[in-house]
Image (tube, helix red, strand yellow):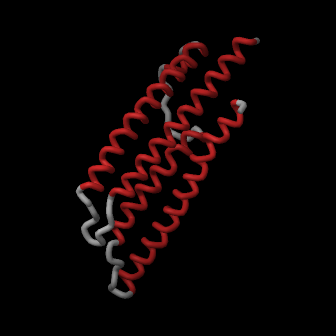
Amino acid sequence: MDTETVLKKLGWLSNKLSYLGAVALFIMMLLTAADVAGRYLFNRPILGAFELTEFLVLILIFSFLAHAQAEKTHVSVDLLVGRFSKKWQKVIGFFNHAVCLALMGLFVWMTTLRVMELKEYAEASSNLGIPKYPFAAFVVIGFAVLGLEYIRDLIKMAKAKKKGVQR
């Protein structure tokens, strides 16, 4: 399997996960509109709307992290590195991505432990009694897919370096 195919397969997951985030945003919009209408027009707000919104925001954020990395839309401030030579910029970029990948591994591990703890103690939301662990598991998925995007970026950087050496 060639490198391009691997890169496309790694990027597929973050793309599909972003669709789930869009659905969560749409549901959150409908829920909030219905809650406001119920509250002010009928004096009957939706029970647990705040809790549901919290869970939907969690899905929204962690489904778009990897997609934002894939599209390079994360906020970045370049005050110092931009003044370095192109070679050093590439070295620092590679190191930065490697550190981020290591952190994603740590985050996946620690949030997995938290998911197991939430499941063991059967923690649930206060009004609706919705179990919290599936949503915490979504955090694990979001971090893992973001880690895959960092792997994808590192492969692209290594591939670009090989092309630069061959010339």
Q: Classify residue 103 by image quadrant.
A: top left
Tell me what residue is drawn at x 61 percent, y 40 percent. Answer: 10
Who's the residue at 49% across and 45% down the image? 65
Residue 165 location (% of width, % of height): 70, 11
Q: With respect to residue 139, does 150 lie above or below?
A: above
Q: Residue at x 43, y 36 (%)?
A: 104
94 and 114: which is toward the camera: 114
Q: Nearer the viewer, residue 51 or 135?
A: 135
Front residue of 151 and 122: 122
Left or right position of 113 against 90: left
- Up/down of 153 relative to 64, above or below: above
Task: Give the quadrant of the C terminus.
Answer: top right
Q: Residue at x 43, y 29 (%)?
A: 102
User: Residue 2: x and y, percent?
Assistant: 72, 31
Give how far across and how far down residue 33 sits, in percent.
45, 74
**Viewer-closest of 128 and 76:** 128
Residue 32, quarter of picture:
bottom left
Residue 26 vertical placement versus 15 (above, below)? below
The x and y percentages for residue 107 are: 38, 38
**Vertical comparison of 125 with 98: above or below:** below
Q: Is residue 16 left or right of residue 28?
A: right
Q: Quadrant of the N terminus?
A: top right
Instruction: Locate residue 105: give its quadrant.
Output: top left
In this view, the residue farthest toward the bottom is: 42
